[in-house]
Image (cartoon, helix red, strand yellow):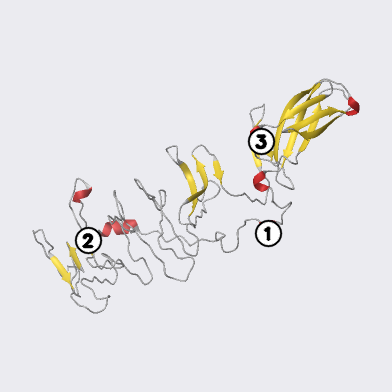
């Protein structure tokens, strides 16, 4: 591995107030090169910088490129080995921060990959046993702790083989949510896919208008509410009805003529319920001997009791069993419904926020 550096500490030297090694050059190649041609351990080092209190290694560049193609770096590491596990630059710390990057106007850290295979511009891994550790951690006083941007692919992607892919936690009070999602176009704000079959299947989605679509069932411990606008202009909460078994309902009005009426089911509604057995409730809009119903001919008949001959309008309510839930258990035991287990719940206490780097001290030293 070869490092090309503007300033390099190439040997263990002692100095008091002045650089132990300094070099100036005007050339298109490196002023100082540290090269280790050993074929021994992978820990062999081409260049090493050690410091008891300050920075062990510092690289400074004063170039001013006009675009990304001409970018330069104060410190540059390049790996030419064939292994995907090698690193151009590697940082290690026993107790503190392995690598700190500070940017005044630009990026503190920028990761770029141009490989056509699966790779990462920035990759963080934690091999420890402490569940509070983090492979990548971001901290911000007022802005964004971690920001991802993409032209075509995913701006931020998370994958877990045994734990939680993404865990979000906020401790700033009710005005600060743990997660915020937004979109500037007509697409989804959030979408969830199932990839167990080898192809991504959309399971739920939230669009920019606040609409939600879910492929499965919703299980809740509390009740369901809907915000309803009142005549005074204020919103009130309405409650969702509860039923011991799944039902599908339709409503309407019809006219009883000389004691008889036939009501045909709406074709779309009829195609979604078991038409062999459903309930019909009627409410007459006038005096009569009472009305009764019978299922017949793609709908139901309504007649007046005692062979009455009244003519009047009436309301009807149809309650059917949905075809796609015909085998549903009546009042199933709650433990049989989808629910969070202790292994899938988000931990109550997330990892501690890292100490904020002393940026003012860093800037004064660079």
In the foreground, 302 or 43: 302
Q: For mark 2, what is the residue? A: 76
The 10 Å Cα crowd at callout 2, few under 14, some 14 to 19, many 20 or more, is some
Nearest to the eye among marks 2 and 3: give it. 3
Quadrant of res 27: bottom left
Label 2 residue SS:
strand
Q: CA distance from mark 2 to mark 3?
A: 68 Å
Q: Which mark is residue 282?
A: none
Q: For mark 3, what is the residue? A: 269
| Of callouts 3 and 1, the N-terminal one | 3
In the foreground, 76 or 228: 228
Quadrant of res 224: top right
Q: CA distance from mark 3 to mark 1?
A: 32 Å
Q: For mark 1, what is the residue? A: 335
Q: Quick check: 129 above or below 197?
A: below
Residue 125: x and y in percent read 39, 65
Q: Quick check: 147 above or below 12?
A: above
Residue 145: x and y in percent read 41, 53
């Amino acid at each position: 591995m070869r490092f090309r550096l503007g300033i390099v500490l190439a040997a263990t030297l002692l100095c008091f107030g002045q650089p132990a090694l300094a070099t100036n050059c005007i050339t298109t190649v490196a002023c100082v090169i540290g090269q280790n041609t050993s074929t021994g351990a992978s820990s062999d080092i081409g260049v090493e910088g050690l410091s008891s209190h300050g920075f062990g290694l510092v690289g400074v560049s004063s170039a001013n490129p006009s675009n990304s193609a001409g970018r330069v770096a104060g410190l540059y590491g390049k790996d030419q080995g064939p292994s995907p596990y090698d690193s151009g630059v590697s940082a290690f710390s026993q107790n503190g921060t392995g690598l700190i990057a500070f940017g005044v106007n630009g990026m503190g850290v920028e990761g770029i990959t141009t490989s056509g295979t699966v790779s990462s511009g920035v990759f963080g891994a934690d091999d420890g046993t402490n569940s509070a550790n983090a492979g990548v951690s971001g901290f911000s006083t007022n802005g964004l702790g971690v920001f991802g941007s993409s032209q075509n692919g995913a701006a931020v992607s998370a994958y877990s083989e045994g734990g939680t892919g993404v865990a979000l936690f906020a401790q700033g009070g009710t005005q600060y949510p743990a997660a915020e999602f937004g979109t500037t176009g007509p697409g989804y704000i959030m979408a969830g896919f199932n990839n167990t079959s080898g192809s991504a299947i959309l399971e739920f989605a939230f669009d920019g208008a606040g609409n939600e679509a879910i492929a499965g069932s919703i299980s809740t411990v509390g009740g369901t509410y809907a915000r309803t606008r009142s005549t005074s202009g204020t919103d009130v909460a309405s409650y969702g009805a509860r039923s011991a078994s799944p039902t599908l309902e339709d409503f309407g009005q019809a006219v009883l003529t000389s004691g008889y009426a036939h009501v045909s089911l709406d074709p779309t509604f009829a195609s979604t319920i078991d038409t062999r057995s459903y309930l019909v409730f009627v409410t007459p809009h006038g005096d009569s001997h009472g009305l009764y119903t019978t299922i017949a001919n793609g709908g139901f008949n309504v007649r007046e009791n005692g062979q009455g001959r009244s003519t009047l309008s009436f309301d009807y309510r149809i309650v059917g069993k949905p075809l796609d839930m015909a085998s549903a258990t009546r009042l199933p035991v709650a433990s049989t419904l989808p629910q969070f287990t202790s292994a899938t719940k988000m931990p109550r206490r997330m990892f501690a926020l890292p100490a904020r780097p002393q940026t003012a001290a860093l800037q004064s030293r660079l």
